[in-house]
């Protein structure tokens, strides 16, 4: 077992336990850990790094997509899309390969107050951190709604698993109209019968423009809204300041102060 110390945290040498290809560009990895870690809250993330021909590829942040239990977790699942060299190498790892894991990092989504409706909005890969939140909330009595949008049906990567879950109402939108309503998921959101009224808590993760639209929607209707921000980061622990975001309380680090923020805390720009 190899561990590299980093403050109070350390990289653990995990092992690829399962690797599953989802469509042409998406993959899911299950990484077993040398010793259980935790507790873990849905919305937290990990830094993963691998070796390539003797060199270390810079660590990349990935949302924790699934895990077993909450207190001490023996494995973590990660969902990712191949977009560059790092994710391309991850996609080629075989079962049994070593991988360095720094986790859990950041904060997590808070639970809604008892009796509140939970309204989740996922855009594309934004489903990754919302998936464990769905699994946690479906066990509670809170009404649970998911608005899941993507470019096409092939990008609704978690839909087969979600569609069979009890206790959740799912609304689908795709930009090309191959599944659900044609258009943006935020357009679908505005058609939602707001039966929860002010006893609704919104959770969202996805592209910046989608998050801004969700934040505007929540502000108009005076709803509590928590969003997960995705930023490039090199360290994941607040040292490099590469992931700062402007908030009403000044610049904050997505890795250390987030990635979960109240939507109204963020200073949104039109080019978000």
Image (cartoon, grey):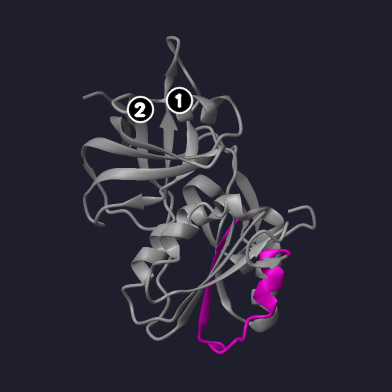
Instruction: Out of 182 and 72, give the one closest to the viewer.
Output: 182
Instruction: Out of 93 and 226, give the one closest to the viewer.
Output: 93
In this figure, what is the number of numbered marks? 2
Quadrant in the picture for the N terminus: top left
Which region shows up in magenta?
A: 183-206
**Alpha carbon of mark 2 to alpha carbon of mark 1: how far?**
12 Å
Is residue 260 visible to us here?
Answer: yes
Image quarter of residue 268: bottom right
Judged from this view, the residue extending furthest toward the front is: 178
Position of 27 compared to 180: left or right? left
Position of 172 compared to 107: left or right? right
The local crowd at label 1, few if under 14, some if 14 to 19, many if 20 or more residues have their Cα within 10 Å, is few
The local crowd at label 2, few if under 14, some if 14 to 19, many if 20 or more residues have their Cα within 10 Å, is many
Instruction: Out of 238 and 78, give the one closest to the viewer.
Output: 78
Taking the spot 52% from the left edge, 82% from the top edge, the residue there is: 200
Question: If you read the primary sequence from the N terminus, does the residue marked by circle 2 or circle 1 appear first?
Answer: 1
Is 190 colored magenta in this rendering?
yes
SS at mark 1 in the image: helix
Number of the front mark, 2 or 1? 1
Taking the spot 57% from the left edge, 38% from the top edge, the residue there is: 241
What label does residue 92 carry, if any? 1
The residue that label 2 is drawn on is 99
Residue 14 higher or lower than 182, as above or below: above
Is 13 colored magenta in this rendering?
no
Image quarter of residue 175: bottom right
């Amino acid at each position: 077992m190899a561990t590299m110390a980093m403050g109070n945290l350390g990289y653990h040498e995990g092992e690829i336990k399962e690797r599953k290809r989802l469509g042409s560009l998406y993959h899911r990895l299950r990484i077993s850990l040398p010793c259980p870690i935790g507790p873990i809250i849905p919305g937290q993330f990990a830094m993963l790094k691998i070796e390539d021909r003797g060199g270390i590829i810079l660590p990349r942040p990935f949302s924790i997509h699934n895990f077993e239990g909450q207190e001490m977790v023996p494995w973590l699942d990660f969902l990712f899309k191949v977009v560059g060299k790092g994710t391309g190498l991850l996609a080629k790892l075989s079962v049994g390969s070593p991988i360095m894991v720094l986790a859990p990092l950041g904060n997590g989504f808070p639970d809604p107050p008892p009796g509140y409706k939970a309204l989740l909005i996922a855009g594309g890969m934004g489903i990754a951190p919302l998936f464990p939140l769905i699994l946690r909330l479906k066990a509670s009595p809170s009404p649970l709604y998911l608005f899941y949008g993507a470019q096409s049906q092939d990008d609704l990567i978690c839909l087969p698993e979600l569609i069979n879950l009890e206790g959740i109402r799912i609304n689908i939108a795709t930009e090309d109209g191959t599944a659900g309503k044609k258009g943006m998921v935020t357009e679908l959101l505005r058609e939602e019968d707001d039966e929860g009224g002010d006893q609704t808590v919104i959770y969202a993760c996805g592209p910046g423009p989608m998050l801004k639209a969700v934040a505007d929607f929540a502000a108009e209707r005076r709803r509590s809204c928590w969003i997960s921000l995705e930023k490039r980061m090199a360290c994941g622990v607040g040292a490099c300041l590469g992931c700062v975001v402007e908030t009403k309380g000044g610049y904050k680090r997505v890795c250390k102060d987030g990635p979960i923020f109240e939507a109204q805390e963020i200073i949104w720009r039109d080019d978000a």
